[in-house]
Amino acid sequence: MAGGKAVSALSPAVQKLAALPILVTVATKRADGSVQLNPVWFELKDGFIWLNSNTSRAWPKNLQRDPEVTMLLVDPKVPDRYAQIHGRLVSLIPDPRHEFIDHLAERYTGKKFRDLEADEHRVTLKIQPVRVTGAEI
Amino acid sequence: MAVELSPKMQAFTQEVFPAIIGTNRKDGSVEIVPVWFEQKDGSFWINGGTNRGWFKHLQRDPRITLLLIDPKQMFRWAQVEGRMVNWAEDPGGDHINHLSHRYLKTDYQGPRTGRIKIQLEPLRVTGSIDGRG
């Protein structure tokens, strides 16, 4: 999948799923090649998937080493309906005023994000979708 | 070496929701899919057709990561790093039927032939259930 062409647009079914306040499962590769899975808040906007993390977490570090990422969205009502999205990290954007994480928190909880810890730094990750597959259990 | 699940993890893994599994493709990319699972005696058991991509990946690289997440409370989750230690044919589909009863409380409606059951042993647990990672 490395080097694949970006998809021009996600299908209406995937867009509908992505509009729900569900978590995306993010798969990254550790240095030893094993798979790390994390549930993550996201937003689909302008054809990109936008994530946000504390910079000290392992998964954004994994992505900086290896920008290939696989993400899974599961229909909360029909768990055997899902979309697997392969993508690539295209940019890492500091979020010093935690505006984007506040925006994501509003989407999921209706409130701003909690107060940041003293040494906490947030970063926004812009992901280009490259390929989408879906199937049933 | 396999790790023993904590009492909290023992209880959490009795709850009924699909596990999300991640396996390594030959080209280095990751496949993730939801699957039914059962935790029994400290091992995780999943079931699939021999033609599933993830089973082929596991035969080449037995490492597997499971994400378990409460669909009603997203902050309750665990990541289990493990590996395939065993697999066997599921003649007649007894095991998939058993899983179907765990998830749907009814007999399995899909094909019962060409299925296998796979035993996974946990090597490391992180996430909010044990309060680590």
Image (cartoon, coloured by chain):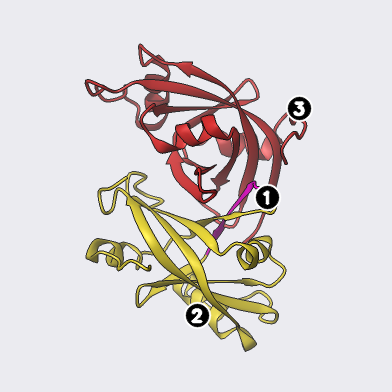
Chain colours: A red, B yellow
Residue B107 appears in view: no
- Please indicate whether residue A32 sits to the left or right of residue A132 in the image: left
Residue A99 appears in view: yes
Label 1 chain ID: A
Could you tell me which quadrant the C terminus of chain A lies in?
bottom right
Label pair 1/3, CB-CB below 8 angstroms? no
Where residue B9 appears, x then y in whole percent? 29, 62
Where residue A77 appears, x then y in whole percent? 51, 52
Instruction: Indicate which disc residue A8 carries.
Output: 3
**Which residue is depicted at the point 65% across and 47% down?**
B28
Q: Is residue A86 above or below residue B40?
A: above
Label 3 chain ID: A
Give, as a three-letter code, the residue at label 3: Ser
Mark pair 1, 3: CA separation: 17 Å
Q: Main SS of the magenta segment?
A: strand
Mark pair 1, 2: CA separation: 25 Å
* Helix, strand or loop status at disc 2: helix
Instruction: Indicate which disc residue B98 carries.
Output: 2
Instruction: Indicate which disc residue A134 carries.
Output: 1
Give, as a three-letter code, the residue at label 2: His
* Helix, strand or loop status at disc 1: strand
What's the magenta region?
Answer: B27-35
Looking at the image, is mark 1 or mark 3 earlier in the sequence? 3
Q: Residues within 10 Å of mark 1 (few under 14, many from 20)?
A: some
Where residue B66 appears, x then y in whole percent? 47, 57
